[in-house]
């Protein structure tokens, strides 16, 4: 058992840290968040130096690495700044579906553009009446002789306001049971790629956090798309999305991990430098113990996230079917505990922590959504219980404990 990162992984960490030092700016972050503006120039530079899609195949402008290397990038970005880091990390959201299930033509068209910071992607899965329940879709996909017609509404679509293409999950077979008969299809933003109909994009403004990232409602009205836009096998869409979400939950966990690491470092530095009664406040047990607990909690988050990524990369044969159990642990445990760590960081700052200038309150707001999107923490608990109910106790005892 080796807990040390290899040379490639350490080099990736250093590259991201150097990038943050050169490109992230506190005043810029405050301005972008205030104006609800995407950090376009930083995203483009991240793509130019290969920080986006390090887990994409090399022939499509990736580095051919794994989930662990990918989350190292995300962790560092969000440690540097929760808002800029999340915006850059989410810029390639759902494009992995094309990597895994797309045709060669799709991969050649979209993946290098995403990896090099020239094209933004979005996944349109969530619906107004179903939330985290992806087993039911009101958005429909109907086949015609010369294409497919899409009707329905999606909400909370990350990157929706400026994405160049959307991967949409829709119900193709209306007679199929819950979770079945769904298909994924690529919808390009450019209307010239459509065969008819319309797509309406409505920005959802005034969010609590994640203010550099667009969240949108998409409305499809008889939108007709070429048959070449079908992504993966028809009526297998939900299975493909769920496989993707196993990997994506780890990425989301890495956002929360980096976010609370950044908050902890700020709190630790403040506690060392801030003096009361001619002593640094870290010397007072109430503050010292709080920082010690934050540190121990942070370490548990770090290693469960890394382990989840390692499982996705290596897929050990004996326990491969339990990977969703561990990815749900990451998606549940890391954001929820990160919230507690960031909240404690605000407490260490005292009244100063409540103001924008210290940045920790923005980390709290940015972290709050991580508990919700890609399946709420409650949905992850449901997943964990569902799997635990089915596993043989001897298997749990011998292989998982």
Image (spheres, rainbow, N blue to C red):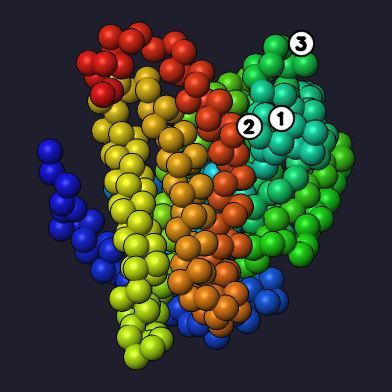
Crowding at dot 1, Cα within 10 Å, few <14 / some 14-19 / many 20+, comes out as many
The answer to which of 155 and 351 lies nearer the viewer is: 351
Crowding at dot 3, Cα within 10 Å, few <14 / some 14-19 / many 20+, comes out as few
Residue at the image position 58 percent from the left and 21 percent from the top: 236
Going from N to C along the chain, the mark reached first, 2 or 1, is 1
Instruction: State the SS at label 2.
Output: strand
Q: Is residue 106 left or right of residue 288?
A: right
Crowding at dot 2, Cα within 10 Å, few <14 / some 14-19 / many 20+, comes out as many
Residue at the image position 26 percent from the left and 24 percent from the top: 401
Going from N to C along the chain, the mark reached first, 3 or 2, is 3
Which circle marks residue 386 in the picture? none
Which circle marks residue 184 in the picture? 2
Which circle marks residue 175 in the picture? 3
Residue with the mark numbered 1: 170
> Height in image: 191 above or below 363?
above
Q: In the rendered image, is residue 324 in sight?
A: yes
Q: Residue furthest bottom?
A: 278
């Amino acid at each position: 058992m080796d807990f040390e990162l290899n040379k490639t992984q350490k080099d990736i960490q250093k590259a991201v840290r150097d990038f943050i030092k050169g490109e992230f700016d506190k005043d810029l972050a405050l301005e972008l968040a205030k104006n609800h503006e995407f950090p376009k120039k930083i995203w483009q530079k991240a793509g130019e130096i290969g920080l986006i899609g390090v887990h994409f195949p090399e022939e499509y402008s990736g580095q051919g690495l794994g989930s662990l290397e990918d989350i190292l990038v995300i962790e560092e970005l969000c440690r540097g700044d929760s808002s800029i880091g999340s915006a850059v990390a989410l810029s390639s959201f759902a494009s992995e579906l094309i990597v895994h299930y797309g045709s060669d033509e799709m991969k050649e068209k979209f993946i290098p553009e995403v990896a090099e910071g020239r094209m933004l992607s979005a996944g349109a899965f969530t619906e107004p009446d179903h939330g985290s329940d992806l087993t039911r879709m009101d958005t429909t996909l109907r086949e015609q002789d010369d294409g497919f017609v899409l009707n329905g509404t999606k909400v909370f679509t990350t990157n929706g306001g400026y994405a160049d293409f959307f991967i949409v999950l829709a119900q193709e077979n209306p007679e199929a049971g819950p979770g079945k008969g769904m298909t994924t299809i690529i919808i390009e933003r450019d209307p010239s790629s459509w065969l008819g109909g319309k797509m309406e994009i409505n920005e959802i403004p005034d969010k609590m956090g994640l203010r550099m990232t667009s969240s949108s409602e998409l409305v499809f009205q008889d939108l007709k798309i070429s048959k070449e836009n079908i992504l993966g096998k028809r009526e297998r869409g939900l299975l493909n999305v769920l496989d993707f979400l196993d990997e994506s939950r780890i990425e989301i966990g890495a956002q929360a991990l980096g976010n609370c690491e950044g908050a902890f470092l700020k709190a630790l530095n403040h506690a060392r430098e801030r003096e009361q009664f001619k002593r640094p406040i870290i010397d007072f047990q109430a503050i010292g113990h709080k920082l010690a607990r934050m540190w121990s909690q942070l370490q548990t988050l770090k290693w469960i996230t890394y382990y989840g990524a390692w499982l996705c990369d290596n897929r050990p044969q004996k326990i491969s079917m339990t990977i969703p159990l561990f990815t749900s642990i990451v998606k549940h445990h890391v954001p929820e505990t990160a919230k507690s760590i960031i909240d404690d960081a605000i407490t260490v700052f005292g009244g100063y922590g409540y103001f924008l200038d210290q940045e920790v309150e923005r980390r709290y707001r940015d972290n709050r959504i991580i508990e919700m999107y890609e399946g709420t923490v409650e949905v992850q608990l449901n997943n964990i219980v569902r799997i635990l109910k089915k596993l043989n106790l001897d298997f749990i005892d011998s292989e998982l404990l």
